Amino acid sequence: MKYYEMHEEVYKDLKDKGYVSWDKKKKAVDLFHHDINIALGKNLSKYFPKIKNYKALDLGTGTGTVALYLAKQGFEVTGYDMSSTAIEMANENAKSLGIEADFEVKDIYTSDASTKYDLVIDSSFFHCIVPKKEREKCYSFVRKSLNEKGIFFMHTMIQSDDMSTMLSAKHLELEGDILWSTGRDSWDMDWEEVKGKRVFAHRRVLSLKNLELELKRNGFQIIERELQENSGNPRTFIAWVTLC
Ligand SMILES: C[S@@+](CC[C@H](N)C(=O)[O-])C[C@H]1O[C@@H](n2cnc3c(N)ncnc32)[C@H](O)[C@@H]1O
């Protein structure tokens, strides 16, 4: 299986245990109290003053945490995720909240963008894409999905000086800017060896400088950004980005 297909296995477990989201919420109504939604909510009305008729796309929507928040604010929302279980859960969350959104199973890396949006969201999706070539393909997907004046909102992890809390987890190893994970024995991965552990590439945790350079190289400019410190863990890079 491809390294990012492990998400499907995680969602199956979450669903079996009665959770409604990646961050283990038990009730759909609690999805709205999520860091990404709080960060989005801070500036949403500045960039989208008249919240009617705007179209938004949530990449790696998972169980619809951000998509459903945006739909509640009046956006017409589409959420893509490659995990069919996540999309099932997103539809269940939409139903229990009485909110409409269009959720589709789609692997963004292997798909072509077909519709234009006013707002494209990276709701912790990009740090799941590890190789440079795959990240460039995903940036191209974003470029093709954005209206000329569209906005790309990023919420992603980046390196901090102290990531000791995260790295104390026995299943994780950081080498350069790749976070490796030991995963489960039953997973059929292209396993590699890092620091004596059998691992697969789990996340790309870029430095601030390299993420900013990557955005520029891929045709984006940051118009506003915030860095959130998360003691002992990677920082969160929150940015409002446009096409150059
Ligand atoms: C860290 S989770 C975040 C989920 C959700 N946005 C949230 O905030 O709760 C990353 C999501 O990206 C999805 N994902 C990873 N690679 C993908 C790909 N190539 N195409 C579509 N979705 C992908 C995973 O299935 C997972 O749902």
Image (cartoon, grey):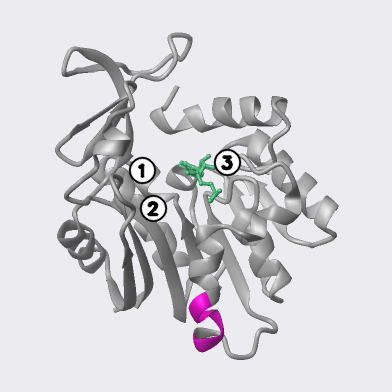
Crowding at mark 1 (Cα within 10 Å: few <14, some 14-19, many 20+): many
Q: Does the magenta stretch include residue 45?
A: yes
Image disc number at residue 22: 3
- Mark nearest the camera among 2 and 1 is 1
Residue 106: horizontal and vertical position, in percent?
A: 57, 44
Point out the tag, 1 or 3, that comes first from the N-terminus: 3
Task: Report if the CB atoms under discs 2 and 1 are less than 8 Å apart.
Answer: yes
On whether ligand 1 comes within 8 Å of the CB at mark 3, the answer is: yes
On whether ligand 1 comes within 8 Å of the CB at mark 1, the answer is: yes
The part of the chain drawn in magenta is 42-46
Residue 140: horizontal and vertical position, in percent?
A: 36, 59
Badge 2 marks a residue whose secondary structure is: helix
Disc 2 target residue = 138
Task: Report if the CB atoms under discs 1 and 3 are less than 8 Å apart.
Answer: no
Badge 1 marks a residue whose secondary structure is: loop
Q: Quadrant of the C terminus?
A: bottom left
Query: Is 100 rendered above or below residue 160?
Result: below
Q: How far apart are marks 2 and 1 (CA)?
A: 8 Å
Visible residue check, residue 115 = yes
Query: Is 10 rendered above or below residue 194?
Result: below
On whether ligand 1 comes within 8 Å of the CB at mark 2, the answer is: yes
Image disc number at residue 129: 1
Q: Residue furthest top?
A: 185
